[in-house]
Image: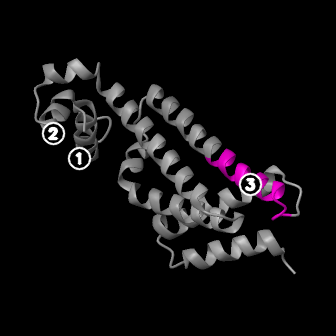
Amino acid sequence: MARREEILAAAQNAFLKFGIEKITLDDIARECGINKTALYYYFKNKEEILSEMLLNKIDEFEQRIRQEVLKKDNVKDRLRTYMLLKINMMRENIPFFQLFENEGLSLKARKFLEENRKKIMDTDFCLIKDVLQQGIKNHKISYKLNNSLVLMILGVTYGTFIGKFIEEEDWDMEAMIHTTIEVIFKGIE
């Protein structure tokens, strides 16, 4: 692992300990085991560290999800893989993403977060739309694609995550995903 990536990994721990607003470069340097001057060699300020951490996390999510989804042979398995993997990855990273829920964030930090939240949603939207379009192209889906179908899948994915892991509902995640996929392919009769 390159030194820059080591610093980002250690900095994530420091951000989780102190929070975005309270953390200092001294805190990050201490967590990294380097002095503050050495930290400036790699990053200008804590905002640059935080930005790169978030962008790396988003890219890691996108690459992993896309790779796993595309390994599957059919539309149902691709959708199921997306939904389960997305929910589990969000669950694994709850502490990291809770950093950004602080109402005391600066306007600049909130704007940056909103831009990247939109990037995540756009990426998810495009991936699901691509999976469905491929199913239509391969005659596995006999339905005209529209955005509401993509939004339904995203809604169930994000809603299941929120209900199960944020609100701590006793939902059977796999059953919910299975039902969603069945409704998509068979409809409600």
Q: Dividing the picture into quarters, in which one does residue 42 lie?
A: top left
Q: Report if residue 84 lies within the magenta region.
A: no
Above-or-below relation of 100 to 162: above
Count residues near mark 2 (Cα–Cα under 10 Å), then give few for <14, some for 14-19, many for 20+.
Answer: some
Left-right relation of 34 to 150: left
Label 2 sits on a secondary structure element that is helix
Which sits earlier in the primary sequence, circle 2 or circle 1?
1
Q: How many marks on residues? A: 3
- The percent coordinates of residue 124 (x first, y second) are 62, 48
Left-right relation of 26 to 168: left
- Say which of 114 and 174 sits in front: 174
Residue labelled with disc 1: 17
- The percent coordinates of residue 109 (x first, y second) are 44, 30
Count residues near mark 3 (Cα–Cα under 10 Å), then give few for <14, some for 14-19, many for 20+.
Answer: some
Above-or-below relation of 172 to 119: below
**Residue at image location 11% in from the left, 30% down from the top:** 34
User: Which corner quadrant holds the N terminus?
Assistant: top left
**Residue at image location 41% in from the left, 34% down from the top:** 105
- Say which of 21 and 33 sits in front: 33
Above-or-below relation of 32 to 67: above
- Magenta stretch in the rendered image: 124-141
